Amino acid sequence: MFGVSFVGVSSQHPILEQLNLSNEIRVAIKKLRDDSALEARAVHHHTTKDGVALNVSVQHPITKELLPLYVCGYVVHDYGCAAVMGVPAHDERDALFAQQHDIPCKPAVLVDNDTVMANSDFASGMPVEQGAKAIVQRLKQEHVGDSTVSYKIRDWLVSRQRYWGAPIPVVYCQSSACSHPDEPIAVPESQLPVQLPPIPSELWHSTTSTSAFPTLADFPDWVNTTCPKCGGPARRETDTMDTFVDSSWYFLRYPDARNDTKPFDKQLVNRMMPVDIYIGGIEHAVLHLLYSRFITRFLHHHEKLLDHPEPFTRLLTQGMVQAATYRDPITKAALRPEQLEERDGQMYIVGAPTDRRPLLSYEKMSKSKFNGIDPVDIVDKYGADTTRLFILFKAPPEKVLLWDNAGILGQRRWLNRLWGLAAGFVAKHSSSSFSSKMLHDHETLTINDKKLLATTFETISLVTDDIALRHSFNTV
């Protein structure tokens, strides 16, 4: 609060219509507003310096200092209040904007200790958390502000115009005599679930394109129904829900999958929730994971069906598998396997001069890059155990795995040595008087036996921790 040196608003903020601005300033604002890349820059590139000085001042709510007001290119209209307090000392975007427009920088914490407030009037010298509470208390006393919690979450468009998906259980009454004409009316619970209309068998075989497949609006016998309020004619909602809606709570169905009267039994699910670990790719962290948390919190806070507000205890974001990608050094186009040949351990382009060597990089497997590895071929050649071992050993699960056929050969040799060691031990002791019960009789063990037993127990402990706690499968 005490580090504020300017205030920025979006180019669409309604206050701009209330200010007495010159034509020159309004033209500059319109140019900023009409920029088609405005929102893309604001969301994805936090280095924008575009802005317009309004030659208008606003008053600081505590110090009463007059601060300059700007239209800032990086302030998003549909987030928050479409206005920000510019704090150049503690925000990268604010700092870049301030440098461009010669706005002073006011540090609000100690330079050598960012946990203690400084240059903050009555809050100076306080720990940051305590100082923030003191500032909020002062704002409340002067009736100019309060604290609130904001969430960086955008609207989730859950509807899809297609046949596949869960029907939305809503109807719209078409009768003018109804008390809810043409308004969404929930389907009564006794009529749930709403079933998808059957598709004629000939349509299954004649339609090869997903885009050509009919939507729910193409089934008039299903669309036309009766209003649950007045009994008059009504039409069903023809959009279906995004499949993410289903997958965002399916883990709650697993413990009670055969329940045909309700989504799940509350007591049964609460004995097992939350899920111990969530494993998914990076794309799940901002889509499926977010939606799952949203629905779980709704079921916890609003419906009181879940005891725990979070669906998952731990998150493991797995890395991508990348493979060698060869490109033409001139066109940069990806090369097919048949366009390459290996000579003396080096790769060359078929039919090209020897000095036109292909460029090598490791990239995500893709058909367009011709770098895909068929797991069936690898299993057929090396065996399933060797393939699994290579995938686990090559890299930690959260890191990128660079596929290398030479490495898989090493794993097969290691497995052969392990198999030989175990087989040799069994052959040596199968006809002897050795028994695992001897390991529990410490009086009969030699010093070396005891050392070996201690090492065995230590190894079991380390392997268990690597698997269950650290998920470091490559060190096991």
Image (cartoon, rainbow, N blue to C red):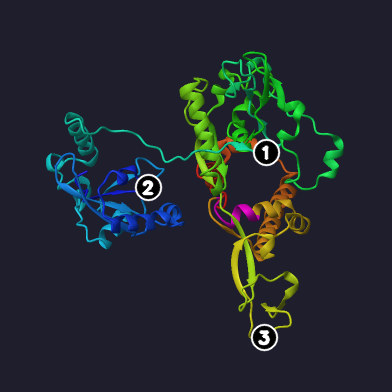
Q: Is residue 446 visible?
A: no
Total labels: the figure holds 3
Question: In screen coordinates, is 472 left or right of 167?
Answer: left
Q: Which residue is mark 3?
A: 354
Q: Residue at x 73, y 29 (%)?
A: 196
Q: Position of residue 329 (x, y in %)?
A: 61, 78
First in residue order: circle 2 vs circle 1: 2
Q: Position of residue 400 (x, y in %)?
A: 56, 57
Depth check, front residue: 39 or 441: 39
Depth check, front residue: 11 or 81: 11
Compared with 357, 195 (above or below) is above
Residue that sits furthest to the right in the current view:
202
Marks 1/3 in contact by CB < 8 Å: the verdict is no
Q: Residue at x 56, y 56 (%)?
A: 395
Q: Which residue is mark 1?
A: 435
First in residue order: circle 1 vs circle 3: 3
Residue that sits furthest to the left in the current view:
122
Q: Residue at x 20, y 33 (%)?
A: 139
* Inter-mark Cα distance, 3 to 2: 59 Å
Q: Is residue 70 visible?
A: yes
| Range of residues picked out in magenta | 390-397
Kind of residue at badge 3: Thr
For the residue carrying disc 3, how many other residues have a C-alpha within 10 Å: few (<14), some (14-19), or many (20+)? few
Q: Position of residue 75 (x, y in %)?
A: 36, 49
Q: Which residue is mark 2?
A: 12
Q: Secondary structure at mark 1?
A: loop
Q: Position of residue 381 (x, y in %)?
A: 77, 59
Quadrant of the drawing holding the N terminus:
top left
In magenta stretch: residue 395: yes
Compared with 458, 390 (above or below) is below
Compared with 175, 388 (above or below) is below
* Front label number (1 vs 3): 3
